[in-house]
Image (cartoon, rainbow, N blue to C red):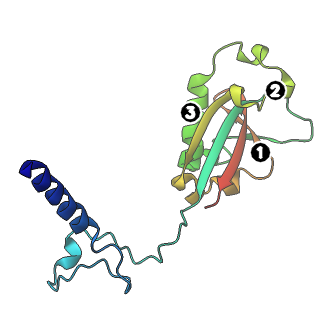
Amino acid sequence: MYRRLLLSSISLVAVSGCTSNSDKEDGTDGDTATDSNSDDLGSSDTGSDNSDEYPPTGYIYVYLAITIPDDEPVYDAKEDNLTEVTDIERALETARSEYTDGLEDEIEPEDETHWENKLAEISGNSVADGNAGSKIEGDGVYVEYEGEKYILLYDQAES
C-alpha cells in the first residue's frame, strides 16, 4: 500500500520539477546561474528573434533533352562556365552517370520534364546561396555536357 503512495509521490515531484520553470512570465527559462560560463552550459539561444524563418532551399533538376526548340540556345557546360558552379557540375555529373544509351528513345518529347524522367536533383541551402539561380534562368536552359544534351531547371523555396 505504501509502495504505491511512494511511487506516485515521486512521479508527481519529478514531473512538477521538470515543468516548474516553463511558465515564467518574465520570459526567462528559470536559469539563475550567474557564472560567467553559463552560456557554455547548453544554451541554445542564437540571438535570433525565435521566428520560424529558415534559409531558402535551392533545387537543380536535370532532364535529358529530347527535343530542343530552334530558337533556344544550347550552352556548353564547360566552355560557358556553368560547371564553375559546384552544384551545377555535381548535378550534371549525376545525370551523366544515370544516363544509359537509348534512354532518349524511351521518353516521349512531351514528357521530357516529367518527374519520372528526372536524371538528377540537387537541393539544399548551398544551392540557393550559390550562383545556380543566375546561371539557370527562366524556364531552364539547354546544356551540352560530355556529349549529351540536358535541360537544367532551377527552383527556390522560400521560408
Q: Nearer the viewer, residue 58 or 100?
A: 58
Q: Is residue 11 above or below residue 103?
A: below
Q: What amino acid does circle 1 point to? A: Gly
Coordinates of residue 8 in the picture (x, y in percent)? 18, 55
Which of 54/1 is in front?
1
- Rendered image quadrant of residue 23: bottom left
Q: Residue at x 16, y 79 (%)?
A: 37
Q: Position of residue 47 (x, y in %)?
A: 40, 78
Image quadrant where residue 99 sits: top right
Secondary element under disc 3, as helix, strand or loop, is: helix
Q: Callout 3 environment at 10 Å: few (<14), some (14 to 19), or many (20+)?
A: some
Do the CB atoms of the residues marked 1 and 3 lie less than 8 Å apart?
A: no
Label 1 Cα neighbours within 10 Å, binned few <14 / some 14-19 / many ≥20: some
Residue pictured at 78% horizontal, 19% vertical: 107
Q: Can you identify the residue that label 2 sits on?
A: 111
- Provide the secondary structure element on which disc 1 rests: loop
Mark 1–mark 3 Cα distance, whole angstroms, equals 18 Å
Say which of 136 and 13 sits in front: 13
Residue assigned mark 1: 140
Q: Earlier in the sequence, mark 1 or mark 2?
A: 2
Secondary structure of residue under mark 2: helix
Q: Any mark on residue 93, and which? A: 3
Which of pointers 1 and 3 indicates the residue nearer the eye?
1
Q: Which tag is nearer the camera, tag 2 or tag 3? A: 2
The Cα–Cα distance between marks 1 and 2, rounded to whole angstroms, is: 15 Å
Which residue: 19% across, 78% down? 38
The residue furthest right is: 70
Per the model, the C-alpha gap separating discs 2 and 3 is 22 Å
Specify few, some or many for label 2: CA neighbours under 10 Å numbering under 14, 14-19, or 20 or more.
Answer: few
* 159 relative to 7 in the view: left or right: right
Q: What is the number of the mark on residue 69? A: none
Compared across the picture, whether 3 is left or right of 52 comes to: left
